[in-house]
C-alpha cells in the first residue's frame, strides 16, 4: 500500500504542471471520445443494449470528477501553484459558460 501511495505522490510532485493541466484535459477529451463511440455503437444496434448506453453515460459523467484529481494534487503535492491555478481557471471557465448559457438561453424559453 505504501508503494502505491509513493507512486501517486511522485506523479503529483515530479510534474505538477502536467498533473494539474495536461492529464485532466486529456482525460476529458478521451472520455468524451470513448463515450461518443460507445453511444454510436449502441445507436447502430437500434439501442437494444442498454448496457452500452450506461457505459457511455458513465464516461460522459465521469468528466465531472476531474476537479477531484486537482484537489488531491493540491493536498498531496509540494508545489501548490499549478493546482491552484488549474482550479481557478477550470472553475472560472465553468462559471463563465454557465453565465453565458443563462444569458443566451433566455430567448429560448417557451412562453
Image: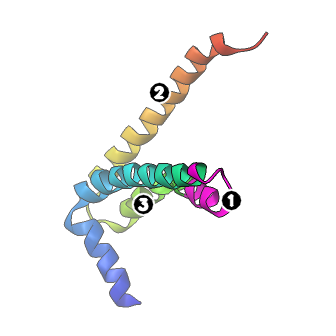
Tell me where residue 1 appears, x and y as whole percent: 41, 90
Residue drawn 56% across the image and 50% down it? 44
Mark 3, residues whose alpha carbon is within 10 Å: few (<14), some, or many (≥20)? some
Magenta span: predominant SS is helix
Q: Is residue 64 visible?
A: no
Residue drawn 44% across the image and 55% down it? 34
Tell me where residue 28 appears, x and y as whole percent: 41, 50
Q: Residue furthest right?
A: 111
Front tag of 1 and 3: 1
Cα separation between marks 2 and 3: 22 Å
Q: Which residue is mark 3?
A: 69
Residue drawn 32% across the image and 57% down it? 23
Cα separation between marks 2 and 1: 35 Å
Q: Which residue is mark 2?
A: 96
Tell me where residue 105 appears, x and y as whole percent: 61, 18
Residue closer to the observer: 95 or 78: 95
In terms of secondary structure, where does tag 2 sit?
helix
Quarter occupied by residue 19: bottom left
Disc assigned to residue 50: 1
In terms of secondary structure, where does tag 3 sit?
helix
**Can residue 87 be found in the magenta stretch?**
no
Vertical comparison of 13 with 110: above or below: below
Q: Along the polypeptide, which appears first: circle 1 or circle 3?
A: 1
**Can residue 46 be found in the magenta stretch?**
yes
Mark 2, residues whose alpha carbon is within 10 Å: few (<14), some, or many (≥20)? few
Q: Residue furthest left?
A: 14
In the picture, measured across the screen, residue 21 lies left or right of residue 91, that is: left
Q: Which residues are magenta?
A: 44-58
Amino acid at each position: 500500500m505504501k508503494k502505491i501511495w509513493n507512486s501517486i505522490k511522485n506523479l503529483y510532485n515530479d510534474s505538477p504542471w502536467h498533473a494539474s493541466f495536461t492529464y485532466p484535459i486529456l482525460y476529458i477529451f478521451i472520455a468524451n471520445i470513448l463515450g461518443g463511440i460507445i453511444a454510436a455503437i449502441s445507436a447502430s444496434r437500434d439501442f437494444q443494449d442498454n448496457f452500452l448506453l450506461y457505459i457511455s453515460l458513465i464516461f460522459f459523467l465521469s468528466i465531472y470528477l476531474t476537479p477531484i484529481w486537482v484537489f488531491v494534487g493540491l493536498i498531496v503535492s509540494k508545489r501548490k501553484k499549478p493546482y491552484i491555478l488549474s482550479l481557478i481557471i477550470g472553475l472560472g471557465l465553468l462559471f463563465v459558460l454557465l453565465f453565458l448559457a443563462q444569458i443566451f438561453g433566455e430567448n429560448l424559453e417557451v412562453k
